[in-house]
Image: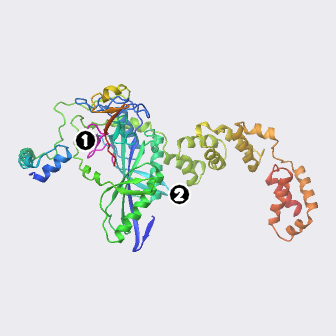
Amino acid sequence: MALIEGKTGAWEMVIGLEVHAQVISKAKLFSGASTAFGAEPNSQVSLVDAAMPGMLPVLNRHSVEQAVRTGLGLNAKINLTSVFERKNYFYADLPQGYQISQYLHPIVGEGTIILDLEDGETREVGIERLHLEQDAGKSIHDQHPSQSYIDLNRSGVTLMEIVSKPDMRSAEEAGAYLRKLRTILRYLGTCDGNMDEGSMRADVNLSMRRPGEPFGTRTETKNVNSIRFVQQAIEAEARRQVEVLEEGGEIVQETRLFDGMTGKSRSMRSKEEAHDYRYFPDPDLLPLELDPAWIEEIKASLPELPDAKKSRFMSGFGLPAYDAGVLVADREIAAFFETVAEGRDPKLAANWVTGEFFGALNKSGIELADTPVDAKKLGGLLDLIADGTISGRIAKEVFEAMWESGEDASAIVEAKGLKQISDSSEIEGLVDDIIANNPKQVEQFKGGNEKVLGWFVGQVMKATQGKANPGLVNQVLRQKLG
Amino acid sequence: MSVDKDTVAKIARLARIRVEDSQSEALAGELSNILGWIEQLSELDTEGVEPMTSVVSMKLPLRDDAVTDGGYPEEVTANAPEAAHGFYAVPKVVE
């Protein structure tokens, strides 16, 4: 729990997040128009999406399945009956004059999500609900001095609104929540989680209170489109609220808009009246009733989810919580790691995947699928370390060469002559020479200066271009200097 | 439940219907009458009765996830008061 120290004492943040996640489906929630991203304006619009009079919505079975799948992935209650309602407001990119959404009876009820925090600790955050709704169209404001252009391609695409309980207490926890939610959605294949393209957007509900006191009045910051911005928006809004409260003012319950460029938020007063949405059940749609057998079928098709995978990596591979958490954050990375670890030392595999491999991946900006060193090749390199052909230090050099050329580790070791010297007579000879030529250091060691041993190891490595087996070098040195 | 002049003005604004001041008194009376008439329903005890959503027993139909519609942007914007470059063109609405 992170407290904010004000002039008059400590304050605690209370944060709840509403996430809008675009559902992966071919067609829209209530029409057969395509959902593909980046098409020509209004080319993926049916007359249902354009709200032509007389058009009737027909629900997409797959959208329903995706919502159920997500609910199951969040350990949430699936409601066998849910109801679509009309949320009424006027905006140019909402041709119906209402959004078909769910209100009193959402498809998914309470669930939980487990956050993996920086220090390897975990924390549970409650899910309040998940409901299905239509996305709105897109307004473009910068193409004409006095007009806005409206593209309805996005109008009617399936959204899941996922509402958390007000269980988070810091910007860090909010970030961890969004990352974990995104990971789960990607594992499930229900949303691509791409915040840049707007397929996952977050609204932040925030209030401040004295620790232990009841909740204060909250504000809602809309449509923050990256995890970093969410964290910035939280920090900025918390400071603003503390300032207001400490000056004896009151927080007004309002909607605010965050500007990533300035790091500041401002009130959207014009939206106040729009909050009177006058929900009522959509007369075009009967209540949605789910067959329990179908839910069981969906449940049986779920993949292994990140939390289960993490505990398997910890118990099966003996990995620490932090490493396991990092590896399961991305399903492809987890699969990559498992291929590398298969039949090898899992700890060594984890170190190499999260260390050298991630380092090279980040530096090059290459996607996992296109990496020059695939899981099999990296495994081959680890085999050479395991059987003593090369040392861990040389392995790093080999890895760099593999990344450059895409060749196998053994081919590079062979071509560059990097095989480790594990012949004790050869090392003994070198050690004898070094001892003979450096009487001063020998004296120091005999006088009890253990650190000099490292210097001797360095000399042997220098003489062999790092190829001497370090374990053997230490052993021979101790024996000869003994 | 009765509706007053201010409520009439608010409902009208939310529904984007222009109501002149001179009309709102009469409308308040009409709306109050309608609400009073509907409110008679609440005299019935419906405790434990499932809401009826259809007079015939039927389920909400579902469709398969297939692209079967769209691809006619000209038709979509054909009735628009104004269109440009395939978009609807509307008075600027910037927050």
Q: Quadrant of the C terminus of chain A?
A: bottom right
Q: Which residue is mark 2?
A: A118
Quarter of the image for residue A434 reads bottom right
- Residue found 32% across the figure and 32% down from its top: B83
Residue, disc 1:
A85
For the point 82% across and 69% down, the residue is A449
A463 left or right, relative to A47? right
Residue type highlighted by circle 2: Glu
Provide the residue span drawn in magenta.
Answer: A90-109
Q: Residue at x 19, y 36 (%)?
A: B53
> Which SS class for mark 2?
loop
Q: Chain of mark 2?
A: A
Q: How many marks?
A: 2
Rendered location of residue A427, percent (x, y): 88, 52
- Tags 2 and 1 both on a single chain: yes
Direction from residue A83 to residue A222 in the image, left or right: right
- In whole angstroms, how far apart are the C-alphas of marks 2 and 1? 40 Å
Identify the image's colour scheme: rainbow, by chain, secondary structure or one colour: rainbow
Residue A163 belongs to the span the image colors magenta: no
| Dot 1 amino acid type | Glu
Q: Residues within 10 Å of mark 1 (few under 14, many from 20)?
A: many
Residue A250 falls left or right of residue A226: left
Report the magenta stretch's main SS. Answer: loop
